[in-house]
Amino acid sequence: MTISIPKETTAGETRVALVPEHAARLGKLGARVLVECGAGLASGHGDDAYTAAGATVDSRSAVLAAGDFILTVRGLGAQDEVRRGTLLAGFLDPFAAVENIRRLAAVGVTALSLEMLPRSTRAQKMDALSSQASLAGYVAVILAAEHSRRIFPMMMTPAGTLLPSHVFIIGAGVAGLQAIATAKRLGAKVEAYDTRAVVEEQVRSLGARFVTIDLGGDGGQTKEGYAKALTPEQTGRQREGMKKACAAADVVITTAQVFGRRAPVLVTAEMLAAMKPGSVVVDLAASGGGNVEGVEPGAIIQRGGVTIIGLTNLPGRVPFHASQMFSSNLCALLEEFWDKESRRFVLKPDDDILKSCLVTHDGRIVNEKIAAT
């Protein structure tokens, strides 16, 4: 089976779907690995490294034409031509890029959208969304430190004591927890909030204070501990509590993203107006509409003395390790369904993992929600 790795064509994308280390790993399984010339350069992986790992470096057209399974970070371009029956995996953004999904179905591509992998123990090693979110949380803190007018750690100097920066993180999922850990390592005073009280223990274990906001009733979580939509009254209580926390903070980082839907607005213009001049807000959900009212996706703006960072693709700012993690996730996916005798990836549409992320197959869109979009 031929595994093909084309160079990413999305503007600003610096990651590569497979690093040389994992190309060698797939080669040991019996796969033939083809890599487009220059595919890994932006992430720090030269063509020579792929050749040394046993892969073959060739032109884009040759790599796509020969691929039985094409591995990508952000899918293929509209002009790319592939054979009918080709397998494709990557972040395909199927709800926003519906026309692209329809095109893949029309040309007979079997597409796996990695955003839709289930959150299960078995699929954890394949969970590229979580691995990249972790890096996004790290980068968010580094960006905040770069744009802040204050240092993060406390310093005791002959010129006086410098107090630590106060960082408030909204959302304690994968990205939020990594942001907490990174800010603490930099010496900041950290607070975090999440509608799910069940995550308080995780927040405290990282050395941060959990901000409690009484939402009334059963709070903002289901019986299983997942976040749920708030009532208008609960939303009002939440915003009032967060307004106080934002006003006291030097840095606010928001991390709430909902796959397939617009990100919820958590930081309003009123909250921004209450923040101190020189404060920094980093919106990790900018590409999905933003958690911060008035954020500009892809830009850094100033509003009332507050810096609002809406840069997108934060994992792409640390492409070496982002590619390493993404590649590991893809490698795990292939190995899970690899048949050693035939030396091929075996598609099992009824398997829980593949059933969740399979979006096109046999010339049609097989995911009902996407098909109805």
Image: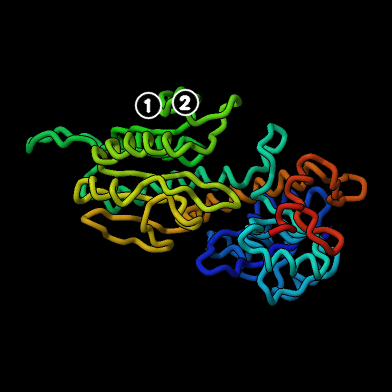
Amino acid under disc 2? Ala
Cα–Cα span, label 1 and label 2: 8 Å
Query: Residue 136 location in percent, x, y?
Result: 47, 48
In the foreground, 249 or 76: 249
Q: Is residue 289 above or below residue 135?
A: below
Residue at point 24%, 50% (across, down): 273
Q: Is residue 283 above or below residue 364?
A: above
Residues tagged 1 and 2 counted as in contact (Cβ below 8 A): yes
Q: Earlier in the sequence, mark 1 or mark 2?
A: 2
Label 2, residues with CA under 10 Å away: few <14, some 14-19, many ≥20:
some
**Secondary structure beneath label 2:** helix
Left or right position of 133 against 69: left
Label 1, residues with CA under 10 Å away: few <14, some 14-19, many ≥20:
some
Residue at point 42%, 63% (across, down): 298
Residue at the farthest right position: 341
Q: Is residue 14 above or below residue 215?
A: below
Amino acid under disc 1? Thr
Work out which quarter of the rendered image holds the C terminus and state it.
bottom right
**Which mark, residue 212?**
1
Residue at point 86%, 49% (across, down): 346
Q: Quadrant of residue 299?
A: bottom left
Q: Which residue is mark 2?
A: 197
In the foreground, 11 or 32: 11
Query: Residue 263 location in percent, x, y?
Result: 49, 50
Query: Residue 176 location in percent, x, y?
Result: 45, 39
Residue at point 43%, 61% (across, down): 297
Q: Quadrant of residue 238?
A: top left
**Which mark, residue 140?**
none
Q: Is residue 210 visible?
A: no
